[in-house]
Each structure stands twice: as C-alpha cells, then as structure tokens.
C-alpha cells in the first residue's frame, strides 16, 4: 500500500467511525439528562423565596418547575444557575387563548422581565388540560401559539420553549408499548400540538406515575418493576411485537408515548417527564404508599436517569424528569397521599434520605455514608422500651455499650439507650430502607450522636481519610484514562486518538 492516496483513504476508513462517535457525543453532551423537582406551595411555614433558593443551592438542585410564575421566587432565582420552568395556570387559559395582547402582556410581565438574569427554560401552558378540563381543550393551541408569537416578538423563542404537561391517560392501550396510541377523541388537538412541538423543537411534557399504573393493575404489574428494582430476565416485561425487554414501568410508559407519536407520523419530538414520584404515606386503601417505597422509587429513578441508559426503544436518548415534589404539601385536600409526595417537609428536613451514592452531588441529603438512626424526640417511654427490647433481642443489635458502667450508659435515660440500640441495628443492616423505623419511634439524622467516650456504631464505619481516598478513586474511575500523566475523559481520549491517527497517516503518506 505505497500509493499515498490509498493510505489516506485507508486511514479515513479507520478513523471515521471514531470521528462520528465523537460528534455524537458532542451532540448528546449539549442535552445531558437531568433530574429536577416540582415546587408546590400549599405548604404551612413555607420557606421564604430567599430561603428557598438557598435551600435549592444547598441541595445541589439545578432544575425546578413552578405551577405559576411567582414573581418573588423568580426574583430570588436571579443570578443563580438554577433553571426554571414557569407555568400558565389553567384558570388563565381563557384570557390568553382569546387575546394575543393578553398573551404578549403575560410574556412581558413573567418572562422578559426576568430573563436572562433568571434562567427560565420553558413555559408550561396549563396542566393536564386535555383530561382535567376538556372543555378548555379548544383554547389550548390558541394560547400556546399566542404565547409563542410573543416570545418571537421578544426574540426569546430559541432560548425558551413552550409546551403543555399532559396526563398519561391521553395514551390508550399502553402495554405493550408498540400498540399504544393517543385517545382518538383528543387527536385533533394532540396532532396540532405535536406539529407545533416539532416545528419549534420543543419537548412533549408528560406527567408519568408508575405508582398509579401499579395501583390500577395490581397482580399484573409487579411492585419491583414499578420501583426500578433489579429483575431476573424472567420478570422483565417483554413487548411481544418488538421483543424489547422492559425492566421498569417508567421506561415502558415513555416508549408508549413515543409509539403513540409515531402513529401520528411524528418522530422528532422528545419526551420530558414533568412529573413523577411515589407517595410516602396513604390511607388503608393505599398500602403501598410508604416511606420505603417512596425512597426506593425516587432513589432508583435518580440513578436510572443519571446513568443515561435511555429506554429500550431509544437507548440513545434519556428523558429528563422532574420529581413530584420538593415539599409535602400539607394543605392539600384528601386523600392523605395527596399531602405526602415530598422529599422534604415544609421546614426543609428530609422525609427520608435518598440512597443515590455515586450519582453525583444532586440532592446533598444523600449522605448514606454519614447517617445515624436515633430515637424520635417526643416518643412515649412505653413505645421506646418496646422498640429497645426488640432491637437488643430479636434484632440482635449490639447493646453492650448501654449496660451499667459502660461508655454509653450515661445519660441513663430511655431516649439515649434506645438511640444507641437503634443505630446499632441500623448499621448492622447496612442502612437498608426500613431499618430505621421501629414503628415511628426512630428517625435518620446526619448529625453524629456520639458524645464524650460514647461512640455510636455509625461513627466507626468509615474514616474521613478513607472516604476521601475512595472518592478520589471513584472520581478517576470508569470512563476516563490517563494520557501522558493527565487524567482525561473517554471523550478527550477519542479526540487525542483521532489527532494522533491523522498525524500518523499524514506522516506515513509523506514518507511513501
């Protein structure tokens, strides 16, 4: 192969796949999937806007969705890196859908007045309009088009997208996903919506709740599939038409939306999950609304999205999601579960601590290596004694340190002894979900309860020095290499290899 032209062609053949792979990575990198949170405000003692923004920053939350365009919150978000979706409430659709001037005024007052200091990324027009207030469906597209025209006039239409969140109930015959289709009575509006989203490169906003799919199909949809738990191949859901295997319900729901769009000849609109979650408490008829299940769902959801594994139909693209919701909205009307979807109580203390180690810094309450289990303040002595007896007996906690004369005997009271026993059991169970409950007598804390010579079991688990070494190893682990002594991502490696390949080919062809 001494012909220089042949050598160059050969090199291009070898290098082109790597080059294309790198280009694809660049394109994907612009739209990395993220996890955001919805912020409802039916909360007693809600944080002030300034406190709320500080809290979001503390928890490393970078994307939020509001159900209105609260001016105080939008002002507080100014000059932060937090991106926000604002909303046109359903009760404003009539005015905006009937008047271009009203739409322009809304954009001027709620978008242009704050952008770009406040990073507004999208406007959600109404919420589940097609299914909750179908009488307003004819106003939906006029409202969307009028708001978009106002964004164009303000030269903001490329930075800020417009869409409308829909309930999953607009999709019929949803499993297997390949046979799903949109409710035909809604097709005229849905078709117009999808054409608009395609034209403006905006996402289809969907509120997707595996919890409700599970509750409505108990005995058919397994709980483990709904909670993203690891499954044996025999438990995976299989689409008989495509032979695609589904390991979780959310992916199946997303793909059923994609198949429904394909049935209307739309293939270039992506799904944005504007709501998903799992309640932590419910009435007797909702026995699966528990803290354990809520923690498992949201923890596994976060890891699933940040793993960027996509769906069986679209493994190349992972939908971003917004967890419903940041706070328990205790002012919500019954049923009980309506008030218990939050990751945090209104006073910003966590309902539970998410188990998302290794998924980055999102939600700083992920302190699974630094948590302890202690007695809940105010629990009556009889309940504590019963829980203590169980922990030190059937639970096989190590309670030697709380015996008379030992390091954790003092102060000699039920709260202190129970806290030590609870933490011993919690650490023995490797902090598994549900291991710090004791029928409500225990709670998880990030504050080390050790005192004096009394060292709680959790304090001995991992030293700060060891943790730093582990984190350092993880930070330079999979997906990166060292190149001439410098750690590089696999993307950087691709660029270097392409560069070296081009130099080699050029030099070899020159010698030939």
Image: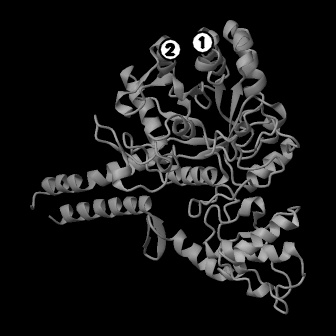
Q: Position of residue 275 (x, y in %)?
A: 61, 36
Q: Position of residue 183 (x, y in %)?
A: 47, 18
Question: Which residue is depicted at the point 74% across and 12% down?
Answer: 102
Q: Position of residue 475 (x, y in %)?
A: 54, 69
Question: Which residue is depicted at the point 51% across and 71% down?
Answer: 476
Image quarter of the N terminus: bottom left
Q: Earlier in the sequence, mark 1 or mark 2?
A: 1
Mark 2 is surrounded, within 10 Å at the Cα level, by few (under 14), some (14 to 19) or many (20 or more) other residues, namely some
Q: Which residue is mark 1?
A: 137
Question: Which residue is depicted at the point 33% across and 38% down?
Answer: 239
**In this picture, is 233 found above or below 41?**
below
Which quadrant of the view contains residue 59? bottom right
Residue ranking furthest to the top: 98
Instruction: Tell me how the rendering is colored.
Output: one colour
| Residue 366 visible in rendering | yes
Image side of residue 125 versus residue 212, left or right? right
Q: Nearer the viewer, residue 509 or 320?
A: 320
Q: Secondary structure at mark 2?
A: helix
Q: Position of residue 435 (x, y in %)?
A: 65, 66
Q: Which residue is mark 2?
A: 186
Image side of residue 50 versus residue 387, left or right? right
**In this picture, is 35 found above or below 165?**
below
């Amino acid at each position: 192969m001494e012909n220089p032209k042949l050598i160059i062609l050969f090199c291009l053949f070898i290098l082109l796949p790597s080059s294309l792979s790198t280009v694809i990575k660049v394109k994907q990198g612009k739209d990395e999937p993220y996890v955001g949170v919805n912020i409802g405000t039916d909360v007693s003692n809600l944080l002030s806007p300034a406190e709320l923004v500080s809290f979001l920053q503390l928890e490393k939350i970078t994307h939020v969705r509001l159900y209105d365009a609260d001016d105080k919150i939008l002002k507080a978000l100014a000059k932060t890196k937090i991106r926000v979706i604002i909303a046109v409430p359903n009760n404003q659709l009539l005015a905006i859908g009937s008047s271009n001037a009203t739409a322009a005024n809304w954009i001027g007052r709620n978008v242009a007045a704050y952008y770009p200091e406040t990073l507004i990324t999208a406007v959600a027009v109404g919420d589940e309009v097609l299914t909750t207030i179908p009488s307003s469906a004819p106003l939906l597209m006029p409202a969307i088009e009028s708001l978009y025209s106002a964004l164009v006039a303000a030269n903001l239409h490329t930075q800020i997208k417009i869409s409308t969140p829909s309930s999953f109930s607009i999709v019929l015959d949803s499993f297997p996903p390949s046979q799903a289709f949109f409710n035909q009575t809604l097709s005229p509006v849905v078709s117009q919506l999808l054409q608009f989203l395609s034209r403006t490169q905006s996402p289809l906003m969907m509120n997707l709740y595996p919890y409700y799919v599970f509750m409505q199909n108990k005995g058919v949809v397994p709980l483990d599939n709904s909670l993203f738990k690891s499954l044996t191949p025999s438990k995976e859901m299989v689409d008989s038409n495509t032979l695609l295997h589904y390991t979780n319900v959310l992916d199946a729901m997303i793909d059923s939306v994609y198949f429904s769009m394909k049935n209307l000849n739309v293939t270039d609109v992506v799904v944005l999950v504007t709501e998903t979650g799992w309640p932590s408490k419910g009435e007797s008829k909702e026995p699966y609304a528990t803290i354990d299940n809520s923690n498992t769902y949201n923890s596994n959801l976060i890891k699933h999205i940040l793993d960027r594994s996509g769906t069986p139909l679209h493994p190349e693209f992972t939908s971003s999601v917004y967890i419903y919701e940041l706070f328990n909205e205790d002012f919500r009307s019954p049923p009980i579960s309506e008030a218990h979807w939050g990751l945090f109580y209104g006073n910003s203390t966590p309902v539970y601590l998410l188990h998302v180690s290794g998924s980055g810094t999102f939600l700083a309450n992920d302190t699974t290596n630094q948590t302890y289990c202690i007695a809940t303040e105010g629990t009556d002595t009889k309940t504590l004694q019963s829980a203590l007896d169980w922990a030190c007996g059937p639970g096989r906690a190590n309670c030697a340190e709380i015996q008379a004369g030992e390091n954790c005997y003092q102060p000699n009271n039920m709260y202190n002894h129970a806290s030590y026993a609870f933490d011993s059991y919690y650490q023995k169970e490797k902090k598994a979900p549900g291991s710090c409950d004791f029928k409500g007598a225990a709670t998880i804390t990030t504050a080390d309860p050790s005192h004096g010579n009394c060292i709680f079991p959790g304090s001995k688990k991992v030293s700060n020095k060891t943790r730093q070494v582990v984190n350092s190893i993880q930070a330079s682990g999979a997906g990166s290499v060292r190149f001439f002594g410098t750690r590089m991502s696999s993307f950087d490696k691709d660029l270097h290899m392409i560069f070296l390949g081009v130099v080699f080919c050029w030099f070899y062809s020159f010698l030939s």
